[in-house]
Structure formats: structure tokens, C-alpha cells
Image (cartoon, rainbow, N blue to C red):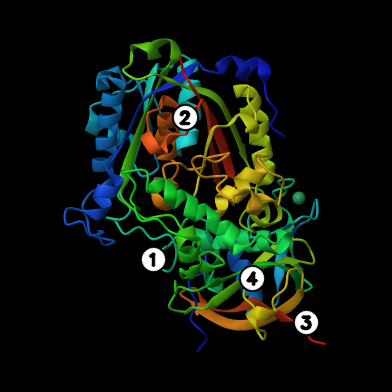
Amino acid sequence: MAVSFDRERLGPLKDTVAVVGVGETDYGADYRGAGGKAMAKGEVRYDSYTLASRALKRALDDAGLKKDEIDGLCTGPTLSSERACELWGMNPRWSGSGDAAQCIIEAAMAINCGLCTTVALVYGNAQRSMDTAYGGSRVTGGGITSYFYYAPWGLTSQGALYALLFQRHKLLYGTTDEQLGAIAVAFRKHACMNPNAVMQKPITIEDYMKAPYVAEPLRLFDYCLINDGGVAIILRRADMAKDCRQTPVMVSGFGWSEENVDATQLRPRLKDFYHTAHREVAAQVYPMAGVGPKDIDVFATYDSFSVHLLASLEGFGFCKEGEGGPFVQNGRIEIGGELPCNTSGGMLSESYMQSWNHQPELVRQLRGGLGQRQVQGAEVAQYVHDVAGKCKSIIYTKGG
Amino acid sequence: MATPRPIRSMDPYAEQFWAYTQKKEFRLQKCCDCGKFRWPPGPTCDKCLSDEFEWAAMGGQGKVLSWTTFRRGYFPEYPAPHTVIVLELDEGPLFVAYPVDMEVADLREGMTLSLRWTDGQDKYGEYNLPVFGPVSS
Ligand SMILES: [Zn+2]
């Protein structure tokens, strides 16, 4: 079942769809609130539709499109497509749902099949307002494949599952806490160059090491934020993209592979670090885009926990298996380094938008003009979605 | 009264697993057609889709793959610090449990641990929880 690149069918889809608009809410300002004080969990300011609507309006304005030019809609998991369409007065010819990478791949297929020409991908999550729980006794379900299954033994939370992964990495390869800490420190440095990021105070490796453990060996700064926000992305058939306000960014490659066998047992997580799925996605996304890891100017990975980056860098061939620890040190993953990663600050320090906020950041890096945060000469950007073995990747390139 | 624990996920197959624990029997489903063990319990063999299975008795030994220590309390029943381990059972499946009769500092990658039982209860009733400790000499 190994994924290989279908040159005949996927090859022609390269650059057929462009990102023409992106919009996000004011993560930092919303988090800090009017008084400049961080909002408490459960202090209701928004619902998910408020945030999604605001992001959609901004993405349309960014693209210079009217809402009636949207003929396809993809919604993130917190939104009902039916309610979103009613709220926004849309009668799309096609709709889909999922995480950001899944929606981009689905929308690219729908556009290429002629089902629609211009798709809005919209996400909103009022998780701080709603005090969403990601572990413990307030989580009452999630199905057999969730950490919920292990509650009788006291195992709970995605964070603990990634702590088990990092502990295994430490045991096998001797990876150190200081090496992992370089990731949180780099992403925070990036957030401090991003006025829209929630976190604006730099941290040092000493701050990282002094911070309390949550699920050891993961510490506070290895965990993503819990904040409110919304993201929207407008994808359009490439030949129609020139009508839009911004320089288009092309969707040049995509790949998808899942590793679900014995997943609740944690086998792919602890015995493979999900590398089988990484390798299969790499075998599709790179040849489709006509680039390799060495050509990537800006990289972003799903980072609900810092350790995602180690696994994806190794799995996609940026370094050898087990060498992620030394790889992320000495500024290599920082802006100005060899492979700038999660340049917005990511989900650790910009905003926890469950993969959605990475897409506008990569698009903006390719458009250029981000000031001190700009990766100089950025032409090829890669997003890796690596969530519990559901792996996807998108490669974006600068359009003409 | 048995020790209260966070609630189990229950379905017709999990029910059978936990029923065996009342007799302190540690049994996992084994496919009658291809022999693959499965965990968590379920209706079908993921390797061959057969629905014929037996509840095979496990030897009760496994090697430590990884562990994590909760430094923040998530369940009132498990105040921090609480350590959870993942073992690779001799029969093949990986199994989540927690270590007993040993210090967390003495955990090592690949060390063999063996089955112990501790009591538990939730809204589905009383049961015994499989946990793991040092191999007795
Ligand atoms: Zn079978």
C-alpha cells in the first residue's frame, strides 16, 4: 500500500490552484483583552462563528473578492458547514471539512474536477472562551482511539502521549531536554517578531529548563497555547488568480498518508515515530512539486507540542533518524538559519489554531515584505501536518 | 470497597476483557484465523477481518518501551506525581499501565516487568486493574 507519486495523474495538478487570500483574527489582542490582561479560561468573549466570520471577511478583503464569488466552502472541525453557509449567506456548489491540509487537498481536487473555482477554507475556535479541556476528568469521550481509553490507569491528554514519544526518543538516541528546548526558544523568538502573536516575551534556554514539567519529560513551553481565534484561506483556480489583489501563491505539491494500525496501542508512535507515514508523504509531495528537502526555504510543522518538529524533520529527510536533537540547535531552525521553522511563532507561541495559522504565515513569507520576520529570498515553503499518524504535507511556491 | 478510578471505556468487547479481570485473568483477543493479537478489544481482526477470536491468556511479562510522569494533576484519583508506562508484551501487543513495587528512577528501557493486580471500581462496577512491577526472583 506504499504511496508513490502518480506522475501521470498528480503531476499535471502542480500549480493549478493558488492561494489568493488569507485572513486571521487578532490573536494577541484578543488574548490580552481590553485591559491588557490575559483572559481567564471560560471568560466568554466569543463563539467560534464570530472568530471564523471575522477571518473570512479579512481573507476576502485580502483577495479583493466578494463573498458571492465563493462557490466552494471547507470548514474546520468546530464549525457546522450548514450553519456557516446560512450565517454567511452562501449556497456553495461543493463543500468539505477537516484540518487545514486536508481541506487544501480536498479543495484542490474539487477545483480541478470542475466542481467549483473559488473555495473559502474557514476555521474558528473559541477554545479559551469555552474552556475546552484536552485531558483529565472533564474529557468524557473521543472514542476508543483517544487517550480517554487509558483513563483507568491515569493516562490522559495528548501532551502525555507526546511525552511518551519524546521519552522514547531520549532512550533510543540520547536526545536531551536542552535540544528539545531549542525548539520552544526559537518559536518564541519568532513570535516576538510577529505583532499578532499571543506571546511577546522572549524566553531563554534557562527559562525553558526552569519551567515546570507538565507530563515529564515535556515542560510548560513544550505545550501549545489555548487561545481564541479564526483563520480563513481563499483558494482559486490558478488561471483566475490574476484577477485578485495579491500575488498568488501556488499549491505546488501535496501528499497524504495515514498510520492507524495499532494506533491506540501507541505502536506507530513509539516504535516508528510515524516515520512510515512521513516517508510516504515525502515520496509524493516532493516529486509532485519538483523539489526536495534541500530546496525548502521556510518550513512549518503542526506543533501542538515541540517534539512534533523532531519527528517530522527526521521523517521527511531533513536529517537522519535520531539526529533531530542536534539538528534543531545553534539557530538552524531560526529566521536567518538554514531552515527557518514555524516563523509566526507557531502554535507554541503565536496561536493554537490546530494547523490553520501555519498556512497564512507560509503564504505571507512567499509574498514577502514581513520586515524582520521575513525569510530572505523565500520561494518554496512546506507545511507538514503530523497529528497522531494522520500525515499530510503541502508545498507552496511563489507565483508569478 | 474497591479503589475508585477514572471511568473505563465500555463496549461489548471491553466488557469481556474486564470480566476476566474479576478472576485476575489477563486475556487479550487472538484471531482464530491468522493469530494476530489485538488491543483494545474489538469485533474484527485488523489483519484479516475475521470475527472469530479467542480470549488468549497472556504470560504477563513485557519490556518497558517508554514512560511519562504527570507533574500536574489531571484526575482526583491520580494526584501528581503519577507515572504511566508503556510495555511491549512478550506476545507482541503494546500495553499501557503504571509501575508498582518499584521506584520510577529505576525504570530502564527494555527492562522486563511482570503483571500485578490492583483493585478498581467505576460506574460499571468493580474490577481488577492490570499493572506491572519487577519480576520476582
Ligand atoms: Zn486475523
Q: Do the residues labelled 2 and 3 touch (CB within 8 Å)?
A: no
- Find numbered disc 1 in the image and state the secondary structure of the residue it sits on: loop
- Please tell me if label 1 and label 2 are on a single chain: yes
Tag 4: amino acid: Ile
Q: How far apart are marks 3 and 4 (CA)?
A: 15 Å
Local packing at callout 4 (Cα closer than 10 Å; few below 14, some 14-19, many 20+) is many
Residue A185 is situated, as x and y percent measured from the top left of the image, at 48, 55
* Secondary structure at numbered mark 2: helix
Q: Callout 2, which amino acid?
A: Ile
The residue tagged 4 is: B85
Mark 3 vs mark 1: give the one in front.
3
Label 1 sits on what residue type?
Arg
Same chain for mark 3 and mark 1? The answer is no
Q: Earlier in the sequence, mark 1 or mark 2?
A: 2
B1 to B107, vertically: above or below: below
In percent of the image, x 49 and y 41: which residue is there?
A335
Q: Name the side, left or right, on which A241 lies relative to B129.
A: left
* Residue A107 as seen in the image, left or right of residue A393: left
- For the question of whether residue B65 can be seen, the reply is yes
Vertical arrangement, residue B32 with respect to residue A193, above or below: below
- Disc 3 residue type? Val
- Please give the residue where the numbered disc 2 appears in the rendered image: A104
Q: Which residue lies furthest to the left in this view?
A: A35
